[in-house]
Image (cartoon, rainbow, N blue to C red):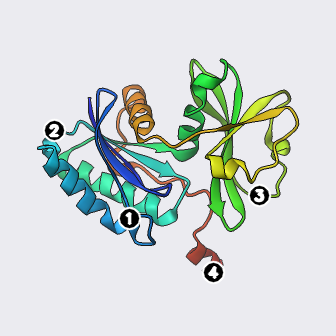
Amino acid sequence: MKILAMDTAIAPGSVALVENGVIMDQRLLPVTPGQVATLPMALEEMMRANGERWSDIQLTVVTQGPGSFTGVRIALGMGKGLSIAHGIPLVGVPTLELLAAGARQLVGEGAYLLPVLDARRQEMFTAIYQIQQGWPVVVGDTFCLSLEHSLARLLPNGEGYVVALPAMLEQLCLPVGWRGLPVDFSIQLLALAGERLYQQQGGAGPLLEPLYVRPSEAESKRGP
């Protein structure tokens, strides 16, 4: 399956063409406040360089959030536009699920994982996942918490693993009995997760909604 994968929820953003699990081409977006504005150009350049037409793409996969508000919105909007204009199926994968999936081969069946993502403002996004049939499945709500919040309050009894990007993991105080597993974000894994989801549930297309978890900074300033 030929997949267009887009992530702008985590900096630096990237887009990739993935075919049968192999990255055919990948473009990193510049780490600047306006990085997401370069997404359409990066897509066009990548498609042209590889001689691809939009009709060749069988699935578009995006990170659904949480993460950068603008980034999540831009990639999702681009995916919806391609779905409407070219009939390309679209699926979204939660960012926290991707982090958990990056550690799935390091833990056993039934293990609990707590992926943590930097939410800025001294906060973090997190949720509880459990490995079921080799893949992380969310078993609770997604939270936005202060970095000082005790992660132990969220966790079921027993041992588990806190999963995060290396820089984020260094900021966390791990609960007793829990190990930290550093993982790197993989656009290839995003494509794999998206294809897996598509085979199970089909595409959401223009109906796909973002996972923001908390109000944006602008909404917070406006108040109720």
Residue type at mark 1 is: Val
Secondary structure beneath label 1 = helix
Marks 4 and 2, Cα distance to the nearest angstrom? 44 Å
Identify the residue at horizontal 64%, vertical 46% (top origin): 166
User: First in sequence: mark 2 or mark 1?
Assistant: 1
Q: Which residue is under mark 2?
A: 56
N-terminal of the pair, mark 1 or mark 3, is 1
Q: Is residue 50 left or right of residue 40?
A: left
Q: Would you call the spot at circle 1 few (<14 residues within 10 Å), some (14-19), or many (20 or more)?
A: many
Alpha-carbon span between mark 1 and mark 3: 27 Å
- Which mark is drawn over residue 147? 3
Question: Residue sitting at 44 percent across and 69 percent down?
Answer: 32
Q: Earlier in the sequence, mark 4 or mark 3?
A: 3
Q: Which mark is residue 118?
A: none
Mark 2: secondary structure? helix
Reading the image, the residue beneath label 4 is 221
Three-letter residue code for mark 3: Leu
Query: Which residue was labeled with disc 1?
Result: 36
